[in-house]
Image (spheres, rainbow, N blue to C red):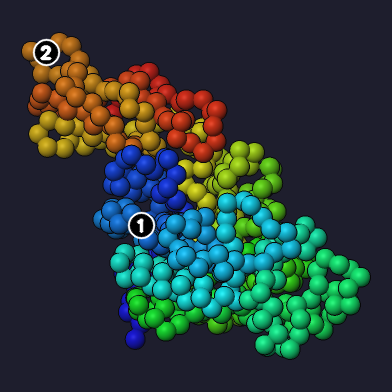
Amino acid sequence: MRSEPARAWALEGPSIQIDPLFPYYLNRSADSIAEEIQLAGYETVHYFVVNENQINAGLIDAFHRRDIAVWALVLGNGTFSTSHLPPEWASWKMGLIKELNDGFERFSPFSAEYVQWKKQAVSRMLREYPFDGIEIAEPYFPEWDGIRRGVYGDIGPAAQQAFHEKHGLSVPEFVNRFAANYYKKTPDTYAKWIDFRVEAVNTLIDEVINGSGGARETRPDILVATWSLAVDGGSVSTLRLKEWQGLDAISMIGKVKPDLHVLQTHWPDWMKRNLKADYASGYESFAAPIRAAYPDLPLGIQADIGSRANMVKDRSWLNRFQNTVYDLGYHSWTAYEYHLGGYMYDDPPIPLSARIQGENEVVISFNKRVDQGSRGRILPESVDNRDQEAMEPEESSVDGNRLRLRFQRLPEKRPFEVELLQVKDVPALWHVKGKRTNEIPAGTWISVE
């Protein structure tokens, strides 16, 4: 019997993706990361899992202490890191028309060994770490317009064998247009090939989630989300994604039976320099059939807010995007990735809260990570009568978005005010380099209760 999820709000409202391996998240406490995300208004995060064996358990716990739900977002079609894979991993690789050397290893869903390894890795991860949800993003084949561009697969040995076993046919030819089995010359075979690839994508996800020893058997309480792509490519874009990348959201949902389905913005859209914030309105050819087939299934949407310097989205864009997707009837949205948004480059550090810790320490929390040279002092009007000058701290330190000030003693008067000095952000840790440093305006202070 299905256990009730502990944090059911993970299925609705705003959420954000985080990749803890980015420099922005390193060399700071897990709680400072969780606090920064919470101060930004999020109650749900999607933890990008690069390696199922290397999870920051302390970060999950820090989110949970703040009642923030945590999805484990794993990739279905490959990996950026092979260090955790068994020696035979190279035999799992997809065969493409044109081999790529882009730092990402693509694995074949027709490789039974890969599928079983992936299922075991995900299940082990869910046993060891208290994630609230599991989602397999990017389970598809490459690539949009891949045949013409040469970035098309899987046409490797495992795919060839599986297709022959199922249909008694050879995989169509995609390069030599003079070949007898060129895909445009054999429409019946090509139609079987398209459906065969859709089935492979759906079966991969289903086995990892619902197979024997899979995610749901391991964690009956776990929430499950499926992902598929969406692109504003005209009225035939749904058919193109099925043909080129093996994606059919309706059949995927029917097979896996998720608690949430997410439409991921495809790169032909997110790479646009001037992508409009209401672009999701062009995805109704994807969303409407899902709603019609599964009216009770929550539907989410994912955006990219800064993977490339020329398409970084600012806060006003993100707000308009959010308003659009709610108006369109989506239950939730997320974005890749929290610290890539334009607000990271545009906004100065802003003190959002201050508290007394222990007997003589003040902790001030900001909207973003601040520089180690940031300082503060208690204003003269807050100091006891016998002191006429501002009270300087004995020690200052920075933990991510927090400035800690330790004084010999604190004023008896409450509240008292702390003036903030030389508080800067950290451009060296940002994704886009060469951006200017933002410094807090002179005279900024915060009241401490």
Q: Position of residue 344 (x, y in %)?
A: 48, 37
Residue 3 vs 277, above or below: the answer is below
Image quarter (top left, top right, bottom left or bottom right) of the C terminus: top left
Cβ atoms under marks 1 and 2 closer than 8 Å: no
Residue drawn at 78 percent across, 63 percent down: 147
| Relative to 249, 346 lies left or right | left
Residue drawn at 32 percent across, 71 percent down: 127
Residue drawn at 54 percent across, 32 percent down: 433
Residue 183 vs 401, above or below: the answer is below
Image quarter (top left, top right, bottom left or bottom right) of the N terminus: bottom left
Task: Residue type at mark 1: give it.
Answer: Ile
Q: Earlier in the sequence, mark 1 or mark 2?
A: 1
The alpha-carbon separation of the residues under discs 1 and 2 comes to 50 Å
Residue 274 vs 240, above or below: the answer is above
Q: Which of 227 and 319 is in front in this view?
A: 227
Quarter of the figure with residue 307: top right
Rendered image: mark on residue 341: none
The reply to whether residue 289 is visible in this rendering is: no
Quarter of the figure with residue 240: bottom right
Q: Nearer the viewer, residue 192 or 386?
A: 192
What secondary structure is found at the residue carrying circle 2? loop
Residue drawn at 10 percent across, 25 percent down: 409
Task: Residue type at mark 2: give it.
Answer: Asp
Rendered image: mark on residue 55: 1
| Relative to 370, 31 lies left or right | left
Q: Where is residue 180 in the image (x, y as percent from the top left)?
A: 89, 77
| Relative to 330, 371 lies left or right | left
| Residue assigned mark 2 | 387
Q: Position of residue 114 (x, y in %)?
A: 51, 72
Q: Label 1: few (<14), some or many (≥20) within 10 Å?
A: some
What secondary structure is found at the residue carrying circle 1? loop
Q: Give the label, 1 or 2, closer to the camera.
A: 1
